């Protein structure tokens, strides 16, 4: 899915947004595993799997980690959601590799707010487009992305 960015005011009552703190990898992995559990994208990942995925992200194994465009949503000091952007090496465009909300925070607008924060930070840096990949049976995610202006496109 592709989307041109636009400036957005990002606010969500009770939550703050901050850059990802790599030193909190265990807590980030917990959000990752908790958020995917029960979805079509869940593949019985463990905490160790989540930490491994994040180490791969942070070491640029799947694309250059775009730290300036990757965010966490915080409920106080607790991580409620994560949005991770990478640079797609073949297409040379930012892509949202992971957008996940911890299970107890789902359906509160956190995913939407994180996507808007990512899009706004890209726009603020002069980047006019981002892509993402979504499982074609992940209907909730597709609805969210379409509501934000993303459109399906074959790559």
Image: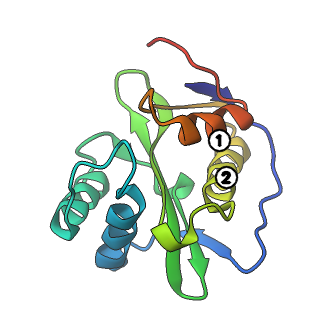
Read off the residue under disc 2: 112
Tell me the number on the disc at residue 27.
none
Residue 10's quadrant in the figure?
A: bottom right
Asked if residue 66 lies left or right of residue 111, the reply is: left
Quadrant, the C terminus: top left
* Secondary-structure class at tag 1: helix
Mark 2, other Cα within 10 Å: few <14 / some 14–19 / many ≥20? some
Q: What coloring was used for the rendering?
A: rainbow
**52 vs 119: above or below:** below
Give coordinates of residue 34: x percent, y percent. Answer: 37, 66
Asked if residue 35 lies left or right of residue 68, the reply is: left
**74 vs 117: above or below:** below
Mark 1, other Cα within 10 Å: few <14 / some 14–19 / many ≥20? some
Identify which residue is drawn at 63% across, 60% down. Answer: 107
Identify which residue is drawn at 64% across, 62% down. Answer: 110
Quadrant, the N terminus: top right
Identify which residue is drawn at 19% across, 64% down. Answer: 46
Give coordinates of residue 90: x percent, y percent. Answer: 35, 22
Give coordinates of residue 125: x percent, y percent. Answer: 67, 45
- The count of marks equals 2
In the image, farthest residue toward the front: 38
In the image, farthest residue toward the bottom: 76
Is the C-beta separation of discs 1 and 2 under 8 Å? yes
* Secondary-structure class at tag 2: helix
Identify which residue is drawn at 37% across, 42% down. Answer: 40
Q: CA distance from mark 1 to mark 2?
A: 7 Å
Badge 1 or badge 2: first in the primary sequence: 2
Give coordinates of residue 153: x percent, y percent. Answer: 54, 14
Read off the residue under disc 1: 144
């Amino acid at each position: 899915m592709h989307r041109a960015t636009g400036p957005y005011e990002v606010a969500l009552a009770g939550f703050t947004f901050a850059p990802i703190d790599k030193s909190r990898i265990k807590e980030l992995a917990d959000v990752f595993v908790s958020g995917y559990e029960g979805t079509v994208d869940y593949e019985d990942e463990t905490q160790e799997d989540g930490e491994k995925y994040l180490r791969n992200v942070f070491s640029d194994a799947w694309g250059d980690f775009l730290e300036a465009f990757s965010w966490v949503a915080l409920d106080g000091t607790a991580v409620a959601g994560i949005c991770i952007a990478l640079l797609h090496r073949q297409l040379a465009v930012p892509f949202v590799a992971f957008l996940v909300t911890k299970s107890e925070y789902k359906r509160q607008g956190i995913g939407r707010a994180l996507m808007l924060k990512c899009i706004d930070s890209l726009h603020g840096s002069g980047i006019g487009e981002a892509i993402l990949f979504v499982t074609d049976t992940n209907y909730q995610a597709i609805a969210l992305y379409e509501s934000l202006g993303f459109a399906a496109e074959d790559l």
